[in-house]
Structure formats: C-alpha cells, structure tokens
Image (cartoon, rainbow, N blue to C red):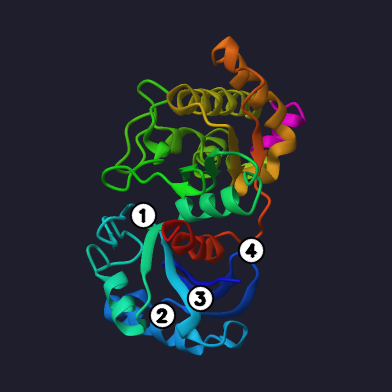
Amino acid sequence: MKFYIGIDLGGTNVRTLLVDELGKTYSEVKDSTDRENGPDFVCDKIIGQIEALDTTACGGIENVEGIGIGVPGPVDTKNGVMIMATNLPGFEDYPICDKLTAKFGLPCFIDNDANVAGLAEAILGAGKDYATVYYVTISTGIGGAFIVDGKLVSGGRGHAGEIGNIVVKNNGYKHGGLNAGAAEGETSGTAIVRKGQEELGDQVIHAGDVFRLASEGNEVAKNIVEECIDELALTFADIAHTIDPHCFVIGGGVMKSKEYFYEELLARFNNSIHVGMRGHIPLLETELVDCGAIGAAMLPMSRLK
C-alpha cells in the first residue's frame, strides 16, 4: 500500500491528511489558515501539520510517496506556484512546493481545488470507470477539470477547465473579471441568488429557494430556472463538442436542488449536441463526501505514475 499527504489550503482553513492510494484517511490535522500573517507563516503552519500527522500506518513520513496541495485559483503546475491568489494574499509565485520538498525530501505538487476534487472523483468516485472525465462544480462559482486516464489536463498555463468564463448569454451580467454573460455570472449559485433577490426580494436566501418557488408555480422563479437550465445545457454542450468526454461528473451546492432541474438539464443537453453523441455522455453526480484534501493527495499519485 502506498501513502500520500494531501493538503486542502483555503482562505479560511487548512487541512492536512495522510491518505492511502484507495483514498482511506489515517490521520488529519486542521486549523485556521491565518492568511493575514503572510505566506511564510502559513507555510510554517502546514509544515507543523505535516509533522503532527500520525504516520504509524505507513511506518513514518519517510515512507510517504509525495505531497499534494489544492488551492483556490489558477496554478502554474509546471513551476508549482499559484498564478492568482485572491483568497491567499502573497501566494502568487510563492514557492510552497519547493519549500515542502526541501523540508521533507518528498516530491510536492499543487493544483486548483476544483481540479483536485475532479481528480478524486475520476480516480475514486463517480468517474472511476471512465477513461475521460469532465468534472464540473456548480456552487458559489463554476469550476471544471478534465481528467484523462487518471491524470489532470492542466493546459499551458494551468487554466484548462476554467469553464466559468465561457460566454453563455450575449450582453449578460458582468461578474468580476469574467466576460459579460459568462457561465459563472449567469448560472452559478451566486448568480441564481442574485437574480432571485432582484426579482423576488427576501423570499430568496439561497439558490434552493428559487428552485422551490419555481416548482410551486411562481412564474418569476420559473423564468429564472428556465434560463439557468438553458445556459447550463449550453455550457455542457460546448464542452462536449470540444473534448467529447466519456462522462461528466457534477458537484457543488446547487446539486442539492437537482430534483428540480437535473432531468430537464439532461434532456436539453442531449438536444444540444450532435445526434451521434446523444445518450452516450452521462451527467453523473459526485460520490465522494470529502474530495478536497483527498483529491490533493491523489495529485502525487497521478503525477508519479
């Protein structure tokens, strides 16, 4: 049995796990990130977490194969650094992988958190029986990852899979630095809440409220949901026509409301792709409860093959 260390580094919390190749967790350490103290402080905290892991199961840290880190934002996977670090100030180009390798003598890899979640689902979860998997998370934002034979496709600058910027509505909403009418600005959980609150006021607290109101016959909510499903179907169709994956795996908080939209999304997706593709690309739901740090641990496993 081979063992790996996975680190889920977020803007609020950082978690470090000792995981085997089957995804079983043997030890976990969690703490607040304290990002305001800077990257050196956070890196030292991660080193402390790794040192605090109980490595009895693998006979000591010297028997660990490698370290993987999942972070929010795009990553230069070749050089092992973050390209953008909105939620982790100071981490742009910060050599965290080099520092951990120097400290522990283990290979270290870093990638976007959506990518490592997708990797976990492709290796251990819903996509494990498929050669190519396209993972999509529909939550606060929209993220994606393309996994081929158990390995992430990162692209030239680590932006492969960043589908949130695909335009799905001409002259649509401008969300942050994304294109006007981008998928994230139109179909994410945040977008659904924004539209719902604009039209329905305090009846909407979260995206599930919009789906529920639509199911109860509220015409305004129904229009929001109809537009969202159309635009999500277009997003999936654009991806399918580009890479023709064996399956999609869909996660994120919006999937908690899947009973209100999933079947219609599947139907509209199939109506939007070539006839020869219809019925051959399933839209699967995620299976893993915790795919952040576990997915990060899968990074060295996939890269060291």
Vertical placement of residue 68 versus 192, above or below? below
Q: Secondary structure at mark 4?
A: loop
Q: CA distance from mark 4 to mark 1?
A: 27 Å
Query: Residue 198: horizontal and vertical position, in percent?
Result: 51, 36
Q: CA distance from mark 3 to mark 1?
A: 19 Å
Q: Which percent across, then down, holds residue 210?
A: 65, 37
Q: CB of mark 2 within 8 Å of CB of mark 3? A: yes
| Sequence-first disc among 4 and 1 | 4
Rounded to the nearest angstrom, the CA distance separating label 4 from label 2 is 23 Å
Q: For mark 2, what is the residue?
A: 46
Residue at horizontal 53 percent and vertical 49 percent from the top: 118
Give the residue type at disc 3: Thr
The residue stretch that appears in magenta: 210-218
Q: Which residue is mark 4?
A: 22
Mark 3 vs mark 1: in front: 3
Residue that mark 1 sits on:
73
